[in-house]
Amino acid sequence: MKIYAAPLEGITGYVFRNAFHSCFDCVDKYFIPFINPNQHGHLSSRERQDILPENNQGMYAVPQILTNCAEDFLRTAKKLSQYGYTEINLNLGCPSKTVVTKGRGSGFLAFPEELDRFLDKIFSETEMEISVKTRIGKEQPEEFEKILEIYNRYPMKELIVHPRVQQDFYKNHPNLEVFAEVMKNSKNPICYNGDLFSYADYKTFTEQFPDVDTVMIGRGLLMDPGLTRQIKTGEKLRKEELKAYHDKVYLGYQNVLSGDKTILFKMKEFWGFLAPAFTHYEKYAKKIKKSERLYAYEAAVEALFSEQDLAIDSR
């Protein structure tokens, strides 16, 4: 089984990727949170730091582009090729309203004719490999039949399918009936993405879809950083490993950010996913969330690790 790490804006940047990769080297591809091309063709400071080769050493990293303008895509692809990248990913999955109202991300799926013209241009005018991360429609899953017909016209590196429509956001359950049809009818290699939060979720999914050989995991890696290794080797996460991983993430942000508030914002986001991995975590999570200084944060984290056990297998 090949396992990919999903891009989560503001969370899975290079600090996270380097810490995760050094502690849990069981990810086949890391997808870099999206680049949003601008009219001048310049990368933002965040985007540039995220794609610099020196910030992605030892891992297979794939930049993602969010746009509905073929010229912007091609311009950005050319720039990325100059950094040594040979594969890029097109974001047709982001459900954010600010993205969708501009006809980008999963909002682009509502305009299949425009999408077809866009794909025709980018596939014909770049030699880079292109993968696509998609939802199954904007409002109704029935939309995907026509969308898949369009996708089948182009030689994608792979099609990464999150079987929800845009209006689901992350509510409801992934539509596995539609995904089954995708597996049957797609001419491109398929990767599954959606609600793989635990080893039990993974086992249930693979029992239903034994022919799937590639999955992408996002929030599940934040909730259980040892999940990829457990899938590949059966070895479960240990508390001392989790502490070492936390410390790398924390030190990484201290090295690149300044000010307690800025660093704590990132770490509180981190714990928003991770805290339920512990038994009786609620009061510790509350202290972490309320901390305004690094010393208070460190005390709360130390207490959680020393006083509670991992509860990942119980959820």
Image (spheres, rainbow, N blue to C red):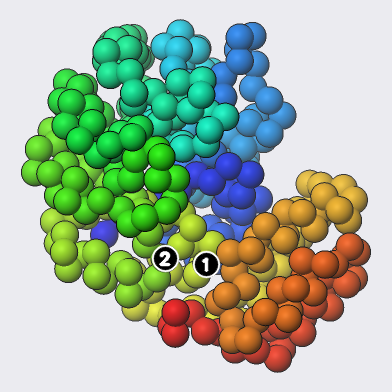
Residue 39 visible, this angle = yes
Q: Is residue 100 above or below residue 133?
A: above
Check disc 2 and report its element: helix, strand or loop: loop
- Quadrant in the rendering for residue 150: top left
Residue 239 visible, this angle = no
Q: Residue at x 65, y 81 (%)?
A: 281
Q: Nearer the viewer, residue 4 or 102?
A: 102
Residue 64 placement (x, y as % from top left): 47, 32
Along the polypeptide, which appears first: circle 2 or circle 1? 2
What residue would you read off at disc 1?
Answer: 223
Judge left or right: residue 307 versus residue 176: right
Q: Give the CA distance from mark 2 to mark 1.
A: 7 Å
Residue 201 placement (x, y as % from top left): 32, 69
Count of numbered tags: 2
Residue 92 placement (x, y as % from top left): 39, 31
Q: Nearer the viewer, residue 191 or 52?
A: 191
Residue 197: mark: 2
Judge left or right: residue 48 versus residue 93: right
Judge left or right: residue 170 versus residue 209: right
Q: Amino acid at mark 2?
A: Phe
Q: Is residue 306 above or below residue 243?
A: below
Q: Residues within 10 Å of mark 2 (few under 14, many from 20)?
A: some
Residue 303: mark: none
Judge left or right: residue 260 versus residue 94: right
Q: Are marks 2 and 1 in contact (CB under 8 Å)?
A: yes
Residue 164 placement (x, y as % from top left): 33, 45
Q: Is residue 216 above or below residue 126?
A: below
Q: Amino acid at mark 1?
A: Met
Q: Residue at x 67, y 79 (%)?
A: 282
Q: Residue at x 40, y 79 (%)?
A: 235
